[in-house]
């Protein structure tokens, strides 16, 4: 059967969706009108150093509004889920590394109580003896990395899951983080969606039981685990969030095989491209000597060209790699044969010189078996050449650089969940967002841990953007491309936030005008745009707390900038990502403040700017009254938003705090 999940249901929610679409059109129309006016008529080019960054930041924000509007355009609110597939076989996978054993035991105990028949597994990346003993006592499966992973890239949680996928055999997988306590009905409420044979993923919300009412760390994310995921669901782009999700094993294995072929082919293309020039240089340097080496290099060069032509023509990868390696073997054997013939001639000459009267003829140096051994690529002189070694490694279909050839979970990013979901969607699989809390977890209980978690999310998301930009991914629909890109786009907001903080300071303190005038014309263009945006946000987020999320989108600007720079360094220069170091003494009040020095400096600068602006207005030296009022209001808004960081730095978690590594 096939359920067209891309079409929002008509009914009680249709009127609200229609209202949302009207507001989206109005907000974008007014926003475009404002931005066009800003670029054409109000940029103070004399002070371009602040005027241009400000209008660029405003254009960024309008693009963000467009992507948000596109997300809400097809918002889908699902009703009751289909009846579960009673005969479905399920493996429940609990991923852990260094979380307390007691925490994992609580999750495993709750997993055992899930009503639908299943097998529960603890995937212990820490390979802890006490964890293994606890698993045996509970009667649940226990999986650690196989020996193949020794000395290889481990790929964190993605590697842990990939290792387990070659051990288990259930049709479906329920993936849980170590702290996520599942409800007994979680499979009964999600398995029914898989009656559609194209559904690969059902994601449910993440909700945290240890978050206070004020939520000073902004952990609950009700806007994302609500309207945003529902909007993505309407475009068939609701993505995997790492936990509290059920996946179809066949879809993952198909993805793993497909990615294996793709990555081997990509490696062949890359190495052929890099080695071609090196082979030419080696051929030129051996040309003066001529002989067998020059001929062998010419044969390998020809083989590399034929292999590249085969890739372009779409020939099977196995045929291409076999043909190339056969040519290398032939060239190696010819080179070794020529070398041995030369050595034999030299020995015969020496024997003749030593015995002028004639002596016993020189013995055969090696037999046929020895010649075969010496002509192997790792014995032949040809194999000592870097270009040949690179080419041979490129066509190694065993992927010796990885612990296992097939990696169903994406390993290109520290956020394996988003990358995996995007690849599944590109293969025409479908996803479902079921908006019902069916598992409860533990949020970070101090600022340092929260920052480490958010940095990891941002870095991983930007890694995916830089390595597999959804706007260029084959197989994705236009809507899916926009939905993935919109999430990635939000993590670029750190640069815009710096401009939004700096612009009013420049005006109030130095009298620099990034806008020609803040008078009635500015208000005529800006205020309607602002009101339309706020009304849209109010309607979309009606009944849920969204203010904390809005605050943190601005407050964490140093983290977003660091995420971008480290992701670029990692993807293009191979540098380590690095993480915010978690404080070893969570109870020390002073230790938390060092993580927010940039935000505290921004608060101080804004307060000073406001005071200077008021003094200049009183003395009559302000550029204009209107401009001062607008910028003081702007500063006031920034201060209200930034104030959450003070509460966050002082926060010490709930009374039920429990140490552990949160994904």
Image (cartoon, rainbow, N blue to C red):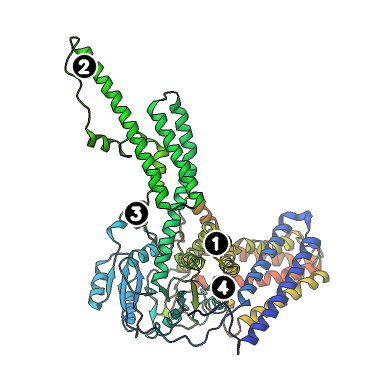
Query: Residue 342, position in %: x, y?
Result: 30, 23
Residue under label 1 = 474
Asked whether disc 4 touches disc 3, contact meaning CB atoms under 8 Å apart, the reply is: no
Asked if residue 50 lies left or right of residue 652, the reply is right
Question: Is the residue under label 4 in contact with that under label 2 (CB below 8 Å)?
Answer: no
**Is residue 262 left or right of 620 when viewed as pictured?**
left
Q: Left or right: 511 with respect to 465?
A: right
Mark 3 — residue? 152
**Of residues 115 and 5, which is closer to you in this image?**
5
The residue positioned 25% from the left and 70% from the top of the image is: 132
Residue assigned mark 4: 644
What element does badge 4 sit on?
Answer: helix
Q: Earlier in the sequence, mark 3 or mark 1?
A: 3
Q: Residues within 10 Å of mark 4 (few under 14, many from 20)?
A: some
Q: Residues within 10 Å of mark 3 (few under 14, many from 20)?
A: few
Figure disc tally: 4
Q: Quadrant of the C terminus?
A: bottom left
Write the residue at 74% across / 55% down: 48
N-terminal-most mark, 1 or 2: 2
For marks 3 and 1, give the CA distance: 30 Å
Between the residue at mark 2 and the residue at mark 3, the CA separation in whole angstroms equals: 52 Å
State the separation of the CA atoms marked 2 and 4: 91 Å
Location of mark 2 (residue): 351
Q: Counting residues from the N terminus, which is met first, the one under dot 4 or under dot 3?
A: 3
| Dot placed on the residue nearer the N-terminal end, 4 or 1 | 1
Foreground: disc 3 or disc 1: 1
Are discs 3 and 1 less than 8 Å apart at CB?
no
């Amino acid at each position: 059967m096939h359920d067209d999940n891309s079409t929002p249901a008509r009914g009680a929610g249709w009127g609200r969706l229609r209202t949302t679409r009207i507001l989206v059109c109005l907000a974008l129309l007014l926003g475009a009108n404002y931005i066009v006016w800003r670029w054409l008529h109000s940029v103070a080019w004399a002070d371009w150093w602040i005027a241009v960054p400000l209008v660029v930041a405003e254009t960024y924000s309008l693009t963000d509004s467009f992507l948000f509007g596109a997300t809400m355009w097809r918002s889908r609110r699902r009703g009751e889920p289909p009846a579960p597939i009673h005969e479905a076989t399920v493996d429940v996978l609990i991923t852990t590394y260094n979380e307390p054993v007691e925490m994992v035991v609580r999750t495993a105990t709750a997993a055992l109580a899930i009503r639908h028949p299943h097998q529960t597994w603890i995937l212990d990346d820490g390979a802890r003896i006490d964890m293994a003993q606890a698993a045996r006592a509970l009667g649940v499966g226990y999986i650690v990395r196989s020996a193949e992973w020794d000395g290889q890239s481990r790929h964190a949680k993605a590697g842990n899951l990939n290792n387990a996928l070659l051990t288990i055999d259930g049709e479906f997988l329920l993936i849980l983080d170590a702290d996520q306590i599942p409800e007994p009905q979680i499979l009964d409420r999600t398995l029914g969606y898989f009656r559609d044979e194209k559904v690969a993923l059902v994601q449910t919300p993440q909700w945290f039981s240890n978050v206070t009412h004020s939520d000073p760390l902004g952990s609950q994310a009700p806007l994302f685990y609500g309207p945003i995921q529902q909007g993505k669901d309407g475009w068939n782009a609701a993505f995997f969030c790492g936990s509290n999700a059920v996946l179809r094993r066949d879809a993952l294995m198909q993805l793993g095989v497909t990615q294996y072929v793709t990555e081997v082919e990509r490696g062949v293309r890359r190495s052929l491209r890099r080695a071609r020039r090196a082979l030419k240089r080696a051929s030129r340097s051996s040309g003066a000597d001529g002989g067998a080496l020059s001929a062998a290099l010419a044969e390998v060069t020809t083989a590399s060209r034929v292999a590249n032509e085969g890739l372009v023509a779409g020939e099977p990868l196995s045929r291409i790699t076999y043909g190339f390696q056969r040519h290398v073997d032939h060239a190696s054997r010819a080179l070794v044969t020529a070398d041995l013939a030369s050595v034999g001639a030299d020995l015969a000459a020496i024997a003749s010189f030593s015995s002028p009267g004639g002596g016993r003829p020189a013995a055969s140096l090696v037999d046929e078996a020895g010649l075969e051994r010496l002509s192997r690529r790792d014995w032949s002189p040809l194999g000592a050449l870097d270009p040949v070694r690179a080419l041979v490694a490129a066509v190694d279909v065993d992927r010796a650089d990885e612990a296992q050839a097939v990696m169903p979970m994406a390993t290109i990013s520290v956020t394996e969940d988003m990358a995996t979901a995007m690849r599944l969607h590109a293969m025409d699989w479908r996803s479902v967002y079921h908006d019902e809390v069916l598992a409860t977890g533990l949020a970070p209980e101090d600022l340092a841990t929260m920052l480490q978690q958010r940095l990891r999310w941002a870095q991983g998301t930007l890694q995916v953007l830089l390595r597999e930009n959804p706007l260029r991914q084959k197989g994705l629909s236009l809507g899916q491309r926009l939905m993935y890109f919109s999430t990635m786009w939000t993590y670029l907001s750190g640069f815009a936030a710096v401009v939004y903080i700096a612009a009013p300071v420049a005006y109030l303190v130095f009298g620099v005008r990034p806008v020609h005038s803040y008078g009635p014309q500015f208000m005529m263009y800006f205020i309607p745009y602002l009101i339309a945006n706020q009304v849209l946000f109010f309607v979309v987020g009606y009944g849920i707390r969204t203010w904390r999320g809005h605050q943190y989108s601005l407050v964490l600007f140093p983290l977003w900038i660091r995420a971008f720079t480290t992701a670029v360094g990692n993807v293009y220069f191979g540098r380590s990502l690095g993480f915010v170091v978690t404080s070893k003494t969570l109870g020390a009040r002073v230790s938390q403040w060092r993580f927010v020095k940039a935000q505290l400096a921004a608060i101080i600068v804004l307060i000073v700017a406001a005071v200077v602006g008021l003094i200049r207005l009183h003395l009559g030296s302000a550029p204009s009254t209107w401009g001062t009022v607008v910028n003081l209001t702007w500063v006031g808004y920034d201060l209200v938003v930034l104030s959450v960081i003070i509460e966050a730095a002082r926060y010490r978690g709930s009374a039920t705090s429990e140490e552990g590594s949160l994904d």
